[in-house]
């Protein structure tokens, strides 16, 4: 990293629904750009930023499913801060579980003062736009976080694909990132830990089959193009109140598995269900993960975005602090920034 031979990097770590999020409040590298979206483009090819990402994400300091974010300045004074989300394969355009973790961290750390009303707004600039989170509190106790994402919409329905498990149809939807949606039962699977390896394999296969097609193109901003992941879901019917109940596993980047129900993936799921009429205003999507954690989600508003009928989704969950770290790289360490075994 330029100008620093052996910097010590401080992180605060959280999990949201079981999915890790490593917060780097003061990245020891320059990340250039006037906006968070521009900084992501810079980070994708800058060797110093890539070095820092690999150091904190790869083994032995991280693992193949590690996730985190570098804090940046906001695009303008209307947000509290910006963030670049990272994983083992690069930098993503959106991350709901990370945004929820950042909101809890911002209130707990005092970066955003606690509102005595019991709802503290935390506004964050992410590569896909500006998101707002409402941290709900009872005294000093955080009781939940409502994540209000960018407008989300279905881009394509019933796209036919030939896969190693037979012919399938998928929907493609945007929730800050582009996701393919596949009913797990259509490929003889269920969203359970016993099917973990097979779910990863078909999730990767669907992503890469679509990634170089027109279905992977964002309609107005090519920086947001590319199928980020595959949402494999089980339809569990309805809960006692008549709300749709589903379970999903999101396989994103190149085979990475979200342990949470996936924040931006849930937003894209809301868009798909709203487009089919399966989730109506006033209803709540009960959305479980492969490890049994849960988000709930609903439609806050209906509108048009980027030329498509869209919704403003709200996803509710919370995050918990797991620790604090001081990482470094010994100059004699032959493994350098580490390795990934997937």
Image: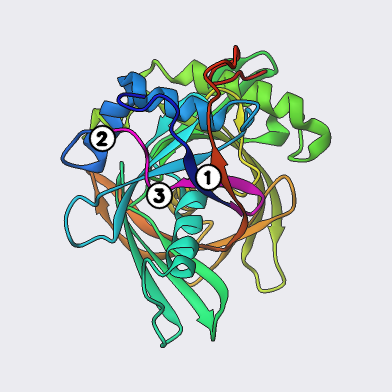
Q: Residues within 10 Å of mark 3 (few under 14, many from 20)?
A: some
Q: Residues within 10 Å of mark 2 (few under 14, many from 20)?
A: some
Where residue 124 appears, as percent x and y from the top left, is 32, 56
- Residue 20 highlighted magenta (yes or no): yes
Residue holding disc 1: 22
Where residue 94 appears, as percent x and y from the top left, is 40, 43
Marking on residue 11: none
Where residue 173 appears, as percent x and y from the top left, is 42, 39
Q: Secondary structure at mark 3?
A: loop
Find the residue positioned furthest to the right.
Answer: 194
Against 70, is 167 above or below? above
Residue 215 figure quarter: top left
Residue holding disc 3: 25
Task: Inspect this view and state whether residue 298 appears.
Answer: no
Against 20, is 133 above or below? below
Residue 107 figure quarter: bottom left
> Quick one: 97 or 155, which is closer to the camera?
97
């Amino acid at each position: 990293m330029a100008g620093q031979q052996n910097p010590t990097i401080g992180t605060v770590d959280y999990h949201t629904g079981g999915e890790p999020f490593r917060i780097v409040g003061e990245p020891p590298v320059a990340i250039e750009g006037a906006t968070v979206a521009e900084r992501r483009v810079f980070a994708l090819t800058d060797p110093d930023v890539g070095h820092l990402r690999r150091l904190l994400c790869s083994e032995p300091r991280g693992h193949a499913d590690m996730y985190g974010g570098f804090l940046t300045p906001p695009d303008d004074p209307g947000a509290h801060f910006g963030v670049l989300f990272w994983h083992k394969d690069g930098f993503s355009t959106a991350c709901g579980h990370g945004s929820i973790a950042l909101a809890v961290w911002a209130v707990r750390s005092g970066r955003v003062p606690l509102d005595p009303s019991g709802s503290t707004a935390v506004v964050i600039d992410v590569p896909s736009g500006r998101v707002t989170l409402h941290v709900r509190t009872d005294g000093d106790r955080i009781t939940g976080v409502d994540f209000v994402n960018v407008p989300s919409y279905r881009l394509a329905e019933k796209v036919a694909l030939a896969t190693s498990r037979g012919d399938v149809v998928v929907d493609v939807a945007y929730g800050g990132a582009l996701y393919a949606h596949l009913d797990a039962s259509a490929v003889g699977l269920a969203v359970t830990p016993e099917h973990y390896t097979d779910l990863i394999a078909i999730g990767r296969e669907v992503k890469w089959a679509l990634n170089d097609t027109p279905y992977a193109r964002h309609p107005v901003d090519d920086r947001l193009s590319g199928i980020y992941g595959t949402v494999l879901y089980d339809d569990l019917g309805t809960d006692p109140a008549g709300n749709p109940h589903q379970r999903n596993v999101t396989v994103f980047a190149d085979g990475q598995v979200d342990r949470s129900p996936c924040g931006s993936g849930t937003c894209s799921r809301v868009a798909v269900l709203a487009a089919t009429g399966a989730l109506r205003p006033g209803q709540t999507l009960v959305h479980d993960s492969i490890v049994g954690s849960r988000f709930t989600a609903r439609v806050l508003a209906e509108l048009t975005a980027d030329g498509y009928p869209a919704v403003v989704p709200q996803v509710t969950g919370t995050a918990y602090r797991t620790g604090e770290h001081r990482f470094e790289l010994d100059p004699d360490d032959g493994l350098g920034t580490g390795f990934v075994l997937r």
